[in-house]
Image: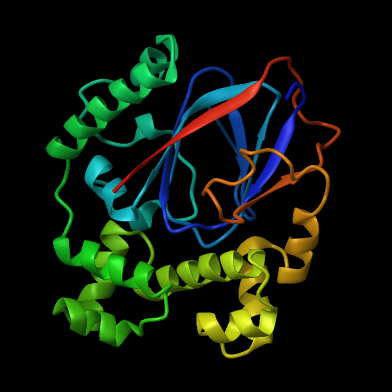
Amino acid sequence: MNRPRRRLETPIGASTLLLGFEQPVRISRAGRTPDTLVSVYCGPTTTPAVGEHGGRFSGIEVLMTPWAGFTLFGTPQHELVNRTVDPDELPHSLGSPLGELAAALAALPGWAERFGLLDEALARWREAGTPSSERVARAWSLLVRTGGAIPVPRLAEEVGWSVRHLENRFREQIGLGPKAAARVLRLQRARRLLAEGQSAAETAALCGFYDQAHLSGEFKAMTGYTPREFAQARRLPAQVSPTADRLSGEATSLVLPARPDDWSGPGAHFSKTRRIG
């Protein structure tokens, strides 16, 4: 793709570490000043973001369970909610700037070698990092398994904590409280069901929304589109790239029209993804 690209990213139940190799990406979110970064860390979000690059952008995107981000960086994740930061601004235990790791990955001849080096670095990082709570991981797994449908009091009971303690530990290690995390996971399931052809009414019932209007309101709040608008935008000719979605088989992203002031530059867009957690 030799032209500037803009892509809308909707909330997903993951944290993201992007190790960029060359040109920067500009990330915009409503109410915040855009960030222009080569490498990016973003914790869980409840709002959409727009990423833009000038036609040449390459790197490795690592999708992590949210509590894995806490382990790797040790930073309370609630400080990073709905934010995009340079990962070198965060403490970590690799012993060298992440920019150096990105440069080392870029210098390797192929993806197999890059993933080998990345896996080695992540294993060392995770072993030396801040331990996360097994109960947080279990609670998160229960939320994921139920698509965010399990009530918070029952979730707290399942892991043996009070609701307040569960909320505090979630904010520390996930970033979002359990109720907000459940909203994101319900949205994620709803997007998947709608993409599979379920009606909005059926999807609302299956995902635990009060009604179709509730589903539409939540969808709009977290993506900027109603379900109908999102589906229509997904059918436009621009939505043909195999890298249009961050999660395989899920409708997570939209390719947007380029703006007149977009960056320009030759080259090809490519990225690879690693998932941990």
The answer to whether residue 124 is left or right of residue 42 is: left
- State whether residue 265 is above or below residue 125: above
- How was this image coloured? rainbow
The residue positioned 28% from the left and 54% from the top of the image is 67
The residue positioned 59% from the left and 26% from the top of the image is 270
Q: Quadrant of residue 58?
A: top right
Residue 41 visible to the viewer: yes
The residue positioned 31% from the left and 26% from the top of the image is 118
Q: Where is residue 115 in the image (x, y as percent from the top left)?
A: 35, 25
Q: Position of residue 265 (x, y in %)?
A: 74, 17
Q: If the image is split into quadrants, where does the N terminus sit? A: top right
- State whether residue 32 is above or below residue 258: below
The answer to whether residue 223 is left or right of residue 237 is: left
Q: Quadrant of residue 213?
A: bottom right
Q: In which quarter of the image is residue 260?
A: top right
Q: Where is residue 186 in the image (x, y as percent from the top left)?
A: 50, 72
Q: Which of 40 and 68 is in front in this view?
A: 68
The answer to whether residue 58 is left or right of residue 15 is: right
Q: Residue furthest right?
A: 260
Report how many numbered discs are placed on residues in the image. 0
Q: Which residue lies furthest to the front in this view?
A: 197
Q: Nearer the viewer, residue 32 or 44?
A: 44
- State whether residue 196 is above or below residue 114: below
The residue positioned 71% from the left and 70% from the top of the image is 227
Residue 177 visible to the viewer: no
Q: Where is residue 275 in the image (x, y as percent from the top left)?
A: 37, 42
